Amino acid sequence: MTLDTTTAAAPRLTSLSHGGGCGCKIAPGVLSQILKRTSGFPMPKELLVGIETADDAAVYRLNDEQALIATTDFFMPIVDDPRDFGRIAATNAISDVYAMGGTPIFALALVGMPLNVLPLDTIAAILQGGESVCAAAGIPIAGGHTIDSVEPIYGLVVLGLVHPSRVKRNADARAGDKLVLGKPLGVGVLSAALKKNALGPDGYAQMIASTTKLNTPGIALAQLDGVHALTDVTGFGLGGHALELARGAGLRACIDWAAVPLLAGVRELASQGMVTGASARNAAANAAQITLPAGFADIDNALLHDPQTSGGLLVSCSADAVDAVLAIFAQQGFDQAAVIGEVSAGPVGLRVR
């Protein structure tokens, strides 16, 4: 096969994929059915975090001072600019290490590209975008794997380290905790608008700024005794990930919807029909365990379940740790971080008020 190495006009990256970013995730209900059909395997005692609570990464205790964090994430294009696609995918993958309270140490690239469709310069730009984010995180891409695929796929395997006593699972929230969200919602809406040519330059700029902002506060948050649970909000939306946090702890999470920050212009775009199919799938999968207030608008429900690509950290912390948590976010440039609810005893699930 002869490969085209010219820079001739390449197709829009988003036109080559049936879904982009974390909106590509298998719907929660379908994923649950798939996993029920897999056989269990005895887990070693050194495995501190496995698949039990749908956490962000696996964690394996190496010794008394170190635990290894291992995660992987990859998806199809959410934007058309190849370098931005690479940056978003890499930021999203590294986030899982921060969400466990760890420090990333190196990454491996996962690359699937339609070689007969995309110029090699375009593919190289995707990889360069990922490399730039890894450089910002202070880690090398030490290898990887590539295939010729029908749709463009890019992501990373990321390894990190954390002290075994500082691992922050998504299942350790406590009754009385406050919930803090690190980034505003709306990436899925912006991506839907982009795919329909309805996203202006300002909207695109804020989408890129949000999705390429590394969740580095996770490292400092893990050092706070008052931080009990951490996760990042990605493809299942705020509703889905808050519900996972509640299920893992056997508690009830409550979200004050008026306090949840949104990216600028997102509500207006959603009212114009700029929502993803993944939002509806997320809402349907979680409906039985989420209580919505009377008159909760369809647009608000879509935003509650909007799939976030490279979304923010969701922190469950004691009330007296809130100021310290918000200070860490502010010091690292997360100026829209906000207290959005709390955790309480009661029927397991999520309530929105």
Image (spheres, rainbow, N blue to C red):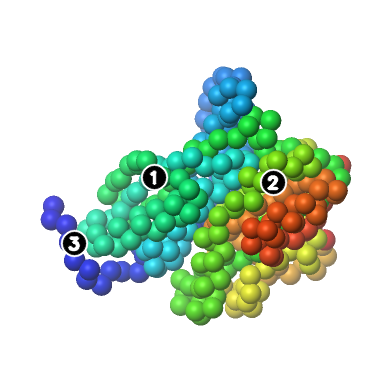
Relative placement, left or right, of 307 versus 351 is left
- Viewer-side residue, 290 vs 82: 82
Q: Is residue 173 visible?
A: no
Amino acid tagged 1: Ile
**Mark 1 burial class by Cα count in 10 Å: few <14, some 14-19, many 20+:** some
Specify whether 29 is left or right of 85.
right
Identify the residue at image location x=75%, y=47%: 316
Helix, strand, or loop for circle 2?
helix
Circle 2 sits on which residue?
Answer: 221
Residue at mark 1: 141
Tell me residue 106's x, y (percent).
Answer: 45, 41
Measure how far apart labels 2 and 1 are at the Cα level: 26 Å
**Sequence order check: which comes first, mark 3 or mark 2?**
3
Residue under the point 26% across and 62% down = 121
Question: Counting other residues with Cα less than 10 Å from the Cα at mark 2, is it few (<14), some (14-19), or many (20 or more)?
Answer: many
Q: Could you classify mark 3 by the number of other residues whose Cα lies within 10 Å: few (under 14), some (14-19), or many (20 or more)?
A: few
Establish if 84 lies above or below 52.
Answer: below
Mark sitting earlier along the chain (1/3): 3
Badge 3 amino acid: Thr
**Element type at marker 3?**
loop
Q: Quadrant of the C terminus?
A: bottom right
Q: Position of residue 289 (x, y in %)?
A: 74, 48
Please tell me which residue lies in front, 349 or 329: 329
Q: Which residue is mark 3?
A: 5
